[in-house]
Image (cartoon, helix red, strand yellow):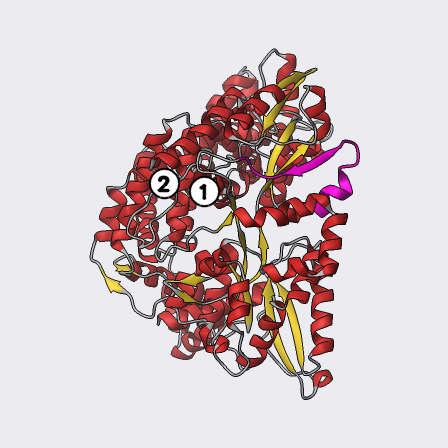
Amino acid sequence: MNLRPNMEKRGKRSDGRSAFFFLLPTLVIFSAFILIPVVFSFFLSFQKWNMFSQTTRYVGFDNYLRALSSADFWAVLKNTFVYTLGTVPLNMLLSLGAAMLISKKIAGKKFLRTAFFAPVVVSPVAAAVIWRWIYEPNFGILNYVLHFFGVPAINWLNDPTAAMFALIVMGVWKTMGVNMVLFSAGLDGIPNQYYEAAEIDGAGPWRRFWRITLPLLAPTTFFILVMSMIGSFQVFDLVYVLTSGGPLGSTKVLVFYIYEEAFKYFDMGYASALAYVLFAIMFVLTLMQVKFMKKRVDFAV
Amino acid sequence: MKKALIILAAVGLTLQSGCGKKTEQNPGTKGKVTITFWHSFVSSTVPALDTLIATFERENPKIVINAQYVPTGDALVQKLITSVQSNTAPDISWIHSDFLQYLVEANAIYPMKTFIDGHDSLTAEDMTDIYPPLLQAASWRGTLYSMPMEATDLAIIYNKDMFRKVGLNPERGPQTWQELVDYAKKLTVKVGDSRQIGFFVPVYPAAGPLGAWMEWQWMPFLWQGGGDVINPSQTQILVDNPGGVQSLALWKQIYNFQDQSRFTVDYDAAFVSQQVAMILDGPWDLPRYQKILTNFNWGVVPLPAGPAGRATIMGGEYLAIFRQTKYPQQAWTFVKWLLRPEVQALWSMKSGYLPVRRAVMNLKGYQEFLKAHPRFAVYVNELKYGRSPRSIDYSGLEITRNIAEAIEKATLGNSDPKKALDVAAENSNKLLQAGGGN
């Protein structure tokens, strides 16, 4: 590891300057669309501003206090947790299963891989149109199939309990493809010798899965867990196009609520405060995951 | 910094939508003035709009109208605001009366008085000829900031064959609330495997884009029951008064005995596929229905009368002239031209919207048109019972949402109508008290 001194010797000031110019386009775009908005919305979260007036008014922590004392906020937070608890485990199970399936030498492997991944690239609006028809109470294919099992017709998108379920199913369908690809890459990274050795030692498929696949996949699994949780906390487009937060607000999630407050009712300060509350929640959750998983996941693999 | 950010956001939007074009004079229109006009007419109305604009340009050879489609609803107000902040506002735009508060606060639009009293004035007779509810909705805090371009109202579109099958007179609609209930009961039957309901109670997710539409469709019932949304001095929400409670109880009653929570919310598809006998709808859907509904007989009847008599809601879209325009006078020329009785008649006959002034009814051509189109005539005749919601000075959008939530809670959520409306009134009154303090 004595590369470092060499590198330092070579590094001159002018290198830094030209590097800066190469980075400039990215920096400009990053500042304009991420950095400045992030800082600006932090500033706004202490203001009252409706986007139209030329002045903002400082209100201290009012926006944050309003969120914490609002029944709407807690209902929305609950919905977000329900959605996360519904999608993340299901998503991980199914995407791992799909990854295992397509890692085998089976007929139609390419077709399956495409089929699992296709929803990821379908535009959410088009996907919602498809699912609206699947969930249609009178002609929908889902109720048609359930009818054969004697289940009475369910109005999927117009029943407060069923709607969240319907949203979760669509959410898993829409996002599991990405995780499948990640798991697939993780599986490819496990050397075949381990399986061969285990097989010689007489380990069955289950044992091989529990003792080799799962532990060696742990870093991938952890990464997917964190990303899926963040993703499900930020879900917006699917809600917007499938249920618009209804019925009876049962599928109104946090980001949808922020959107409404900001761009429907123009309460920019309150919406910014909500965005920072969301950030705080995700930060704490991710921190907890890192702390908890550090002990169990061997990152050296 | 705020301004810079808004400009950035606007640039982003412009790049995205590719239509941030400002009024320009291109070579082909030398000596002419181009007026950009934003509207949200659906594609089936665009041919009518083209005819209208062609007629205008023939009569006013110095003005070119550049009509641009923009999405309506939330998207429209967002687009208007960013365009104002970034100096790319249109000369004229279609707006909803709910937006007035924001546009006036941003000092984005001209008060109409500037033009009405100007050298190219509208006479007092012209002004009193326009339906007063429309002018009321086009005003904010007593000042007229926009002009109605067309009117709409609500009536019941019904399936005559279904009426006949259950022994109802297919030429007569429900005249009272009680009859509406009786009709709906009679028409709610099982047909083979699927069910049919009598009257589609317009209940949608309050949070969604249809939330405001639901509130809009409830308002005529609110007035039929003797209630109103807000008092004239805008200090108190009145929806939880007996009139409001009664009308919501009527909706809830019908909703419940039809078991409508298990029915589709797509009333249009349900009517077309003959699953529902009566729907509430506006005249704008008639041309389309005329084209597709050929396999059964259908008609239009006025809304029933409630305890406080007949009422329907009169709505419309309003034209505002933006302060950023270089040609306010030419923009006004177009707006004023649109209000002429013969232009209103032409527009109504071509587009399926209703005229905004009474004088149109006396035009011979229009009377003949109504005779030839009896379904459309129902809507026109109903205008005499038309009322418009008072445009609310502050937090109109939030108050609409609160009321929509109450309607959804009482029907789908099966809560007590009085309790649901009390909550809506309480939350809305808080907003009124907070008032214009930004």
Magenta includes B289? Answer: yes
Q: Nearer the viewer, residue B326 or A111?
A: B326
Amino acid residing under circle 2: Val
Q: Which residue is mark 1?
A: A231
Mark in front: 2 vs 1: 2
Query: What's drawn in magenta, residue-wise?
Result: B286-304
What residue is pinned by disc 2? B239
- List x then y, in percent, for residue B277: 65, 28
Above or below: residue A120 compared with residue A93: below
Q: Could you tell me residue A108's position as x and y percent? A: 73, 30
Inspect the magenta stretch and tell me whether residue A203 lies in it: no
State which quarter of the image contains the N terminus of chain B. Answer: bottom left
Q: Chain of mark 1?
A: A
Q: Please count the marks in the image.
A: 2
Residue B409 in percent (x, y) is at 40, 31
In which quadrant of the rendered view does residue B143 lie?
Answer: bottom left
- B422 sits left or right of B70 in the view: left
Q: Secondary structure at mark 1?
A: helix
Q: Residue at x 60, y 69 (%)?
A: B37
